[in-house]
Image (spheres, helix red, strand yellow):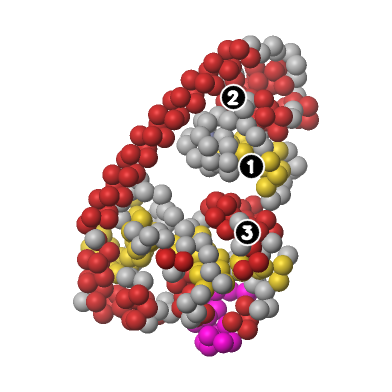
Amino acid sequence: MRINVDAVIQKSDLIEYVRMAGGNPHRSGAGWASHCPLHGGDNKTAFSINAGDDGRLLWHCFSNDCGGGDAITFVQKWQGLSFREACEWILGERITDYEYLRESAAERLAKAEEDERKARERKQARLHELQVAERHLYYMRQRKSAQWATDSWLAAGLDEGLQDFFYLGACQDFTYWYDGVEYHTPTLTIPYFNERRELVYIQHRLQNSKGGGKYRPDKSGIPLPPFLAFPEMGYDGGLIIIVEGAKKAMVTWARVNDTDAQAIGVPSLTQYPHVADALRERGERVIVIPDPRDKESRRDSRKPYELAQELGAKVLRLPVKVDDFLIETKLTSNEFINLLRQARKI
Ligand SMILES: [Zn+2]
């Protein structure tokens, strides 16, 4: 039998399969979210289902190595079938032993829990090393002794008082690898703190990047958390501004200049759903400032707007990125706050 893939997709019901596999898909933004039925775990937004450009439903797991795909790839991974077998199952030409599936699901879950525990331990150990070393203070001293570093932060819109407030630093000789080759470059460093003022991450911005992006972690294996401009305030405040990345959060928060305000830098577009969980019930006080993007850019570019919709928050659209905007327009604090009042629900 030749398989007509379009007919298989037509007949498939991805959401039902996710449910059958033990997931619990619920509406989230324009699609659905669930814990991941493939690797287990209890993160209720680790797994998403969204309609692709051609209308076909696509799944994606944000954690572990489950990957993503359409209904056929989901059935393959869930039941351990070949492509052809998965198509046959969807078309009703293949019978499934659910007892066996339940057992193998239990095994996968147990293994996933063990893997998660080990990963958590490794992460904790690295975090502990980072915290006891007080490296952010070491980098801060290097910044104070290097005029180029202080000047770079100044050009980014942060005066020396703010550079001290955020413990911004520099590293004269940072080593990184790209494509198996070792490179050296000076970097600018940004420490991230949690609500208890514990150091949870140090980010290096490479001055000379040979590839693989401009940013690197001080220690690998620690996930990049959202950046809190005013750590003690956490995911709260009389005004909560959501921007993309740490630098914009610092520049925006500094310009608002209000100790009742918070600015949060979301590290990547895929992290927006996680921030939503932390901000629930506070949507009325949230203003999202997305980076401007072309319409044709990746589907994830809707994430900031979806966050605003989900929280009932407002959106401020700017013609350029907010940090560039504030430097170019030289708005005073009051002028910027007036502009923030122009933010609207979408
Ligand atoms: Zn998964």
Q: Which residue is mark 1?
A: 33
Secondary structure beneath disc 2? helix
Residue type (three-letter) at the residue carrying disc 1 = Ala
- Front residue of 271/25: it is 25
Residue 196 at what x, y percent from top left?
A: 38, 60
Asked if the stretch drawn in magenta spans residue 330, the answer is yes
Secondary structure beneath disc 3? loop
Tell me which residue sits at (75%, 42%) in the image. Answer: 55
Residue type (three-letter) at the residue carrying disc 3 = Glu
- Front residue of 311/267: it is 311
Residue 260 at what x, y percent from top left?
A: 51, 75
In front of the other: label 1 or label 2?
Answer: 1
Q: Which residue is mark 3?
A: 281
> Image height check: is 47 above or below 147?
above
> Image height check: is 311 above or below 249?
above
Asked if the stretch drawn in magenta spans residue 15, the answer is no
Q: Is residue 4 left or right of residue 332?
A: right
Q: Main secondary structure of the magenta part?
A: helix
**Displayed quadrant of residue 227:** bottom left
Distance between mark 1 and mark 2 Cα atoms: 17 Å
Residue type (three-letter) at the residue carrying disc 2 = Trp
Q: Is residue 18 left or right of residue 157?
A: right
Distance between mark 3 and mark 1 Cα atoms: 19 Å
Q: Which residue is mark 2?
A: 78
Residue 92 at what x, y percent from top left?
A: 75, 16
Q: Which comes sooner in the sequence, label 3 or label 1? A: 1
Q: Which comes sooner in the sequence, label 3 or label 2? A: 2
Image quadrant where one finds the N terminus: top right
**Is the CB of the residue bearing disc 2 within 8 angstroms of ligand 1?**
no
